[in-house]
C-alpha cells in the first residue's frame, strides 16, 4: 500500500483493519481536549477564485485558520507537503483542560510564557499578547480612574 492509501483509509469514517493499524503505529489514542484536522493548502502561485475577480476586504481575511472554531486551543504539528498541495495535520490542544494540566507529558503547553500569542513576525511587534485589537485599544482609548 502506498502513502496515499494509508492517508485515505485513515480519514474514512469506518472501522477497518488499516485504520486501526495506522493509529496504532502513530501511537495515537482518543483523548479529551484534543482536536485533529487534516487540511490541504494550495501552492502559492494560483489565483484565488472569487466572483468577478473582486476580493472584498483586505488580504488578511482571505484565509481561514483551523483555530477559528477552537479559539482556546494551540496548534502543535503539521504532516507534510509536496507538489501543488501541502497537507497539514493540525493538532489542537486545549491548555486549560484539567487532564492536560495534570499530565506531565503535556504540561509544557500550559506554561505562562505560552499564553502570549503565537505571533513572531513583523505584524506583532507593538501588540499586547499578539493581538492587534488590544494594542489599538491600548493606544486609542483613554481610561480615567477616579480615586475618592
Image (tube, rainbow, N blue to C red):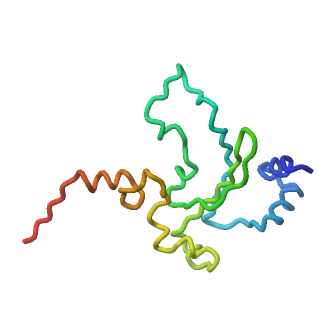
Question: Would you place residue 38 above or below residue 32 in this image?
Answer: above
Compared with 28, 40 (above or below) is above
Residue 64 % position (x, y): 55, 43
31 or 126, nearer to the observer: 126
47 versus 146 height, above or below: above
- Left or right relative to 144: residue 99: right
Where residue 39 appears, as percent x and y from the top left, is: 67, 47
Please identify the residue farthest to the front as the structure is shown: 122
Residue in view at x 55 percent, y 74 percent? 98
The outermost residue toward the right is: 1
Left of 69 or right of it: where is 127? left
Q: What residue is drawn where x is 89% and y is 58%?
A: 17
Q: On the rendered structure, is 39 left or right of 17?
A: left
Q: Quadrant of residue 74?
A: bottom right
Q: Position of residue 123 (x, y in %)?
A: 43, 50
From the top left corner, tell me how far across and down residue 116 is, in percent. 44, 64
Residue 33 shown left or right of residue 136 in the figure:
right
Q: Residue at x 53, y 22 (%)?
A: 53
Q: Could you say which quadrant of the image residue 15 lies in?
A: bottom right
Residue farthest along the left direction in this orientation: 148
In-front residue for pair 46/8: 46
Indicate the quadrant containing the C terminus: top left, top right, bottom left or bottom right. Answer: bottom left
Q: How many numbered dots are placed on residues in this image? A: 0
Q: 51 and 15: which one is in front?
A: 51
| Residue under the image location 55 percent in, 53 percent down | 67
Amino acid at each position: 500500500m502506498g502513502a496515499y492509501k494509508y492517508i485515505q483509509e485513515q480519514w474514512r469514517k469506518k472501522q477497518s483493519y488499516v485504520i486501526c493499524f495506522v493509529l496504532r503505529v502513530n501511537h495515537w489514542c482518543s483523548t479529551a481536549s484534543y482536536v485533529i484536522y487534516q487540511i490541504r493548502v494550495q501552492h502559492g502561485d494560483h489565483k484565488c477564485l472569487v466572483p468577478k475577480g473582486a476580493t472584498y476586504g483586505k488580504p488578511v481575511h482571505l484565509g481561514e485558520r483551523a483555530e477559528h472554531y477552537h479559539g482556546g486551543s494551540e496548534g502543535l504539528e503539521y504532516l507534510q507537503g509536496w507538489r501543488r498541495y501541502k497537507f497539514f495535520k493540525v493538532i489542537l490542544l486545549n491548555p486549560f483542560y484539567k487532564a492536560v494540566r495534570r499530565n506531565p507529558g503535556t504540561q509544557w503547553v500550559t506554561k505562562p510564557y505560552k499564553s502570549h500569542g503565537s505571533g513572531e513576525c513583523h505584524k506583532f511587534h507593538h501588540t499586547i499578547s499578539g493581538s492587534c485589537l488590544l494594542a489599538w485599544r491600548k493606544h486609542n482609548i483613554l481610561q480615567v480612574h477616579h480615586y475618592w
